[in-house]
Every structure is written in structure tokens, then in C-alpha cells.
Image: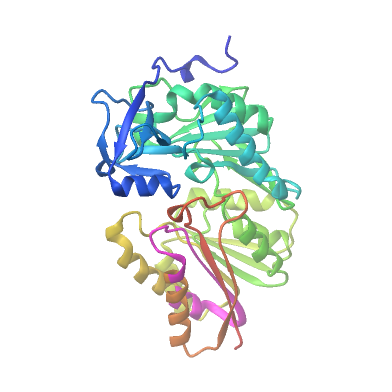
Amino acid sequence: MSQFTKSITSSYTPKRLATKLNANGERFVLQGHPWLFSDNITKINNDAKSGDLAIIFGKNKNKVIGLGLYDGNSPIRIKMLHSGNTGATINAEFFNTKIEEAFAKRQSLLQTNTNSYRLLFGENDGFPGLIADVYAHVLVVKIYSEIWLPYLESILESLQAVSKAKTIVIRLSRSMEQSKLHKLQNGEVVYGVLENEVVEFVEHDVNFSANVIKGHKTGYFLDHRANRKQVGEWSKGKTVLDVFSYAGGFSVHALANGANEVTSLDISKQALEIAVLNGKLNPYSGTHKTIADDAFAAMKQMIKDKQTFDVVVIDPPSFAKQQSEIELAKKKYAQLAQLGVKLTAKKGLLVLASCSSRVLADSFFDINTQVLNESSRTSECILKTHHDSDHPIGFPEGAYLKCGYYRFEG
């Protein structure tokens, strides 16, 4: 009898699909890229269904060059699991090995006083369309594709064994919520008991909480962990502005590290309430202010009011979710940098971040440099950071996070 709820059991038994690709598709596979688009495929079974195993043959008919899962609902038609002709078998043991390898990569982080981490980072850990985050004793698995339904039970067993989670919560993307191939509910507890949907956890000695049922993504954004720690260390005795603060990640680290005054700015009142509660999970003596408003409008008003802060952190949501939005996103990043310059006090620190994968790191940093050079103030880029260790990068499109620290002389 399964230890998981019946709703995760898939009634579909995957087929094996003999698959041929064009030259571009073969090149992607041989380079280890995890995505194959429909126009890369020249031959595949007509009755292919999501979750079927694509056996990819090279120009030499008898040579297998890769294995992937077929996704009938995505322009990324095959999501790769394995590249190369090494006789790999896709089964519970295969996935368990991948999960153990992913866990091993997180060991340096878990040597710190941190019990929240990303155990599986989608394609970058060999699980395209699957995310697994751990918050203390609770594992939250977010599913973005139907391809995982036939394999989910064995994957969850391995994730639970490796993470030693007492509870597993399933989160579903919008497309997965609409899928008729499963009986899962978004926010369903499929293993153990969830006593409270708000789960407390620790991040580099600082206490936080995440709503694992209703919060964004899996409940929190773990990718900025190292940057939050860094900002906290540089905030002692300072005034801090945290723009697009969401649940107060940067704000709480600043308060916990002795900031005199922290202002959290976000358009969501609910997020700001969580930020205040997160702050109170830690002892602090500074003042925590909140502003619920559009970030651009609020920052312009602060400039009119001649307000400045010793540390200004601007970490917006993704501005370029589609290719057509890239140029507008770049303009918005430039505007935020301009506003940030005006709000940063003499000898202050401006921290600018981007999570738009379509705006490449070099382009983002170039935008910041240009804005800073055009201002009348002298500044120096003292640090550039990317993903934390639990967000390893396995292919170019997997790299989305970049953050620049700019120190002003006057």
C-alpha cells in the first residue's frame, strides 16, 4: 500500500517512442540542452502522449543519442532526461540517483544554519518542469508539466527519503490545474500532516515563514538567499529601502543584523503583512516601516520629498516573460536604476537585481553601468552575484538571476 494519497497515482503506463530529429535537434541533444521543440522533430509516433519516453536516434539508425519525456501540451515537445548512448534506463532508480546527486550539491549550504533550500531546480537538476523546495520539515513540489504524472510516486518517495521531510505538499501550475489527467489539487498534502500552512524556517541564522499553500511559487523565493545575507551584513546601523519587498527577505535580514530603520515597499498589502510578521520572528531594535504602493510611483514621491537611504535594494519581478517584452524590460531596469541613484544617500549602497532570464546578465549590468555613468555621482561596482548554490545552472536559459552592488563615494 502506498504511503502517499491515492490522488498521485497515475493510471497511464508510458509508451516508448522511436524519435528522429533534424540537424538542429541533434545538435541540441549532443550539446546536452534539455529542450527539443516541435520543429526539431522529423519522426515520432502519431499516438504519442504526455509522459511517453522518447528514445532519440541519431543519423546512424541503431545509435541512441538521448532519452526524454514527450510533452504534447508544450512547444517544448521533448524535455530531455539523458543525453548520450550509455544504455540508461528511465526508472525509479534513475530518478533516485539524480535526486541524490542534486542533494549532494546542496551540502555546503546545509552546513550553515539554514534549513530551507531548493532540492530540485527543474532542468538544471535533470527534472524539466519540476521544482522541489524544502522548508524545515515540509517539502513542496511544484509540477509544471503532465510528463511527470506517471513517475510522480517513485520521485516523491525518493525526495522524501533524501530530504527526510515529514510532510509533502503539491503545488500545480495553472496549466496543470486545468489538466484532466490527474486528480491532484493545488496545495494538496499528499504525505504526512500539515499542521499549519504557514511554515517557519531558518535562513543563515534568520527566521522566516512561508505559506506553502497560498504563497507565490512554492511559498517563498529562495534564490536570493546569499544576497539577502550580504545585504544584512552591510546594513548594521543603516537606513534601508527594500523595493518590491514581497515577504521582506532583504528587510528582515537588515533588521536582524542591526539596521536602524527599514522601509519595505510593495504593491501587495498582504505581502507586507507577511514581511512584518517575518521581521517579528527575530529580535531587532530598529524601526520597520511599510508602504503599499506602486514601486515607481512611490519612489518618485520619495525623491520629491528628498528622502534618501544608506542602502537601497531594488529587486523587481520578471519584466520579460516573453521575447517581445525584452526592450520594455530594459527600459524599466534603466528607470529603476535612475530612481535608485537618487534615493541612495552619500556613501550609500545601491543593490540592483534582475530575475528576467531573457535579459542576459551582461546586458543588465551594462544598463546599470550606463545609468550610473550618466549620473553626476561617482560610484563603483563592488560586487556582482548570480545564483545561490541550490540553484545550479545546467544550461544557458537556466541562468536568470543577477545582482549588482554599487557603492557611491559622495
Say if 201 sits above or below 160 in the image: below
Q: Is residue 344 magenta?
A: yes
Could you tell me which quadrant the N terminus lies in?
Answer: top right
Say if 29 sits above or below 172 in the image: below
In the image: residue 224, left or right of residue 234: left
Give the residue drawn at x 56%, y 61%. Answer: 386
Q: Is residue 347 magenta?
A: yes
Could you tell me which quadrant the C terminus lies in?
Answer: bottom right
Along the line of sight, which residue is nearer the eye, 135 or 44?
44
Along the line of sight, which residue is nearer the eye, 27 or 345?
27
Give the residue drawn at x 61%, y 48%. Answer: 390
* Residue 86 locus on image (x, y percent): 51, 35
Residue 332 image-quadrant placement: bottom left
Residue range highlighted in magenta: 337-362
Q: Is residue 396 visible?
A: yes
In the image: residue 243, left or right of residue 349: left
